[in-house]
Image (tube, rainbow, N blue to C red):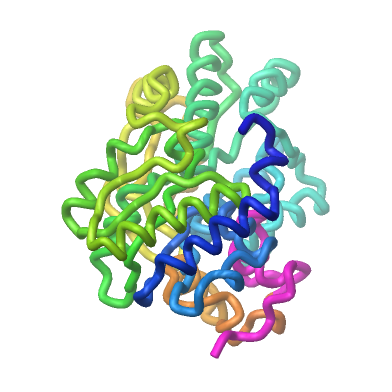
Amino acid sequence: MKYVTEYRDAARVRDVLDEIHRVTTGSWRLMEVCGGQTHSIIRHGIDQLLPDSIEMIHGPGCPVCVTPQELIDQAIAIASLPNTIMVSFGDMLRVPGSQKDLFQVKAEGGDVRVVYSPLECIKIAQDNPDREVVFFGVGFETTAPANAMAIHQAKQLGIPNFSMLVSHVRVPPVLDALLSADDVHVQGFLLAGHVCAVMGYWEYHPLVEKYGVPMVVTGFEPLDIVRGIEMTIRQLEESRATVENAYSRVVVEGGNKPAMTIINTVFEECDRNWRGIGNIPRSGWQLSPPFHAYDAARRFAVDHIRTEESPLCHAGEVLKGVMKPNECPAFGKECTPRKPLGAPMVSSEGACAAYYNFCRFEAST
């Protein structure tokens, strides 16, 4: 197949669903790691077309959702400073901090801008040499190469008024943390195709060997999703556990070597705090010592800011797959897209936003 419409063909999807029904004999709980996959599943009703014995659990693969509130408050503190331009991807502007969000800072007169690429920040910094330009660098492995390249270019060009507030996280450590948690019961994973397009899937073999849980690299179109589910179910039904690739048109096992090179040049692994989940060792990236001059948290001395999450928001349970969004007592009541309590209701990849936008208000029984 060559065209994206072919991966949305209802007849092809139905054929794979029929095969899933045919081969399924047990009860299985699968987690799609990526929030983009969650939205595809809910938008197309894929979870409702599966056998009743297959439950889809929504994972923590939404970069906006897992960014802790303290990072939001640090970004707000920087954006509120005079002579500062805060630049971000659009989703981050509506994520609530402890008192306000970046949109409110903009409404109060702060210079907060939306870009589609971090490399745009280089031009903004060059055009405003008398102002500090800060990019809120959030993301999984998918956005890390472009963010790293922006820092690398800034250093090469000698741009002194550009820095980045980094909140990068990595998938393999969080899956390790989930699989070792007592309250998480997942028997198979659909891995995020765009993350694996950058990093490959070689990092997941040790997790499969350690926990005996199948993992399948999966894309985002309906046919990609159901094929990933079928391959995972076949492994479970045959008592196998390995890493398989259902997204070979994009992903190779070894990953994108130039992308990984720029990541390893600019970043180094670090412990990272995840919203509602807590600190996970070596689950993030921070700027390596040669690039510390571009670390906004150091430059503006905001890394001391610590805040508490709202007690009404159950984002952590949702991100771990312990709770479905519509099982949260605040869902659709105190927490809506217009007045969100947490990032999963804001992000275009958030599970809570998917359930709200596609009218999944009733919890399953």
Q: Residue at x 69, y 48 (%)?
A: 9
In this picture, is 137 found above or below 292?
below
Q: Position of residue 319 (x, y in %)?
A: 47, 66
Q: Residue at x 40, y 53 (%)?
A: 231
Query: What is the quadrant of the N terminus in the image?
Result: top right
Q: Position of residue 26 (x, y in %)?
A: 35, 75
* Apparent side of residue 363 relative to residue 26 in the rendered image (left or right): right
In this picture, is 82 found above or below 19?
above
Q: Position of residue 339 (x, y in %)?
A: 74, 71
- Which region of the structure is painted magenta? 336-365
The chief SS type of the magenta part is loop
| Residue farthest bottom in this picture | 365
Nearest the viewer among 19 and 291 is 19
Query: What is the quadrant of the C terminus in the image?
Result: bottom right
Residue 142 in view: yes
Can you tell which quarter of the image residue 258 is in? top left
Can you tell which quarter of the image residue 135 is in? top right
Q: How many marks?
A: 0
Would residue 154 be counted in the magenta stretch?
Answer: no
Residue 73 in view: no
Nearest the viewer among 188 and 67 is 188
Q: Position of residue 83 (x, y in %)?
A: 71, 33
Q: Residue at x 65, y 85 (%)?
A: 362
